[in-house]
Amino acid sequence: MNTTIYKAIGEKIRELRSGRPDLSQEKLAAALGTTANTVSRWETAAYKPSVADLEKVSRYFKVPITVFFPQIDTDAKLHALLSATGDLDPEDLAEIVRYAEFRR
C-alpha cells in the first residue's frame, strides 16, 4: 500500500472518532487496548495500522472494515475475507496470501 491509503485510513479513523464529541483519542485507545499516541499516529498516517488494528476499530464503531478502503469494491466476498483474516497473526496471514497466490 502506498502512503495515500494510510492518509485515507487515518482520516476515516479521525472522522469516526470526531463523530462522537465525547470520544477522545485517549478513550478510543483505552477501548482498543492501545495508547493515545498510537491512535494519534494512525490519524496522521505516521503509523500504519495492521489489519487486526483496523478490525478492532471497525468493530468498535460498528462499521465494516471496508470503510477504510474506499477505492476497493466492497462486495460480499472481499468483506468476508477482510473480516475473517482480521485476528490472524502475521505468519498465518502470510500463509493465506501464499495460498491465494498459488490458487491464482
Image (cartoon, grey):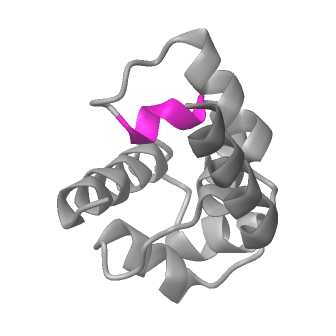
| Up/down of 65 relative to 21, above or below | above
Identify the main secondary structure in magenta: helix
Residue lying at the far top in this picture: please name it.
76
Residue 45: give x, y in percent of width and height. Answer: 30, 72
- In which quadrant will I find the N terminus? bottom left
Which is nearer the eye, 74 or 45? Answer: 74
Whole-percent x and y of residue 96?
A: 73, 49
- The residue nearer to you, when weighing 22 against 49, is 49
* Extent of the magenta region: 64-69
Query: In the image, residue 36 lies at what x, y percent?
Result: 56, 82
Q: Is residue 67 above or below residue 12?
A: above
The picture quadrant where one finds residue 78 is top right
Query: In the image, what residue occupies the spot 50% across and 74% down?
Result: 39
Q: Residue at x 71, y 53 (%)?
A: 56
> Residue at horizontal 38%, vertical 38%?
69
Q: In this picture, is 3 found above or below 55? A: below
Q: Is residue 65 inside the magenta stretch? A: yes
Quadrant, the C terminus: top right
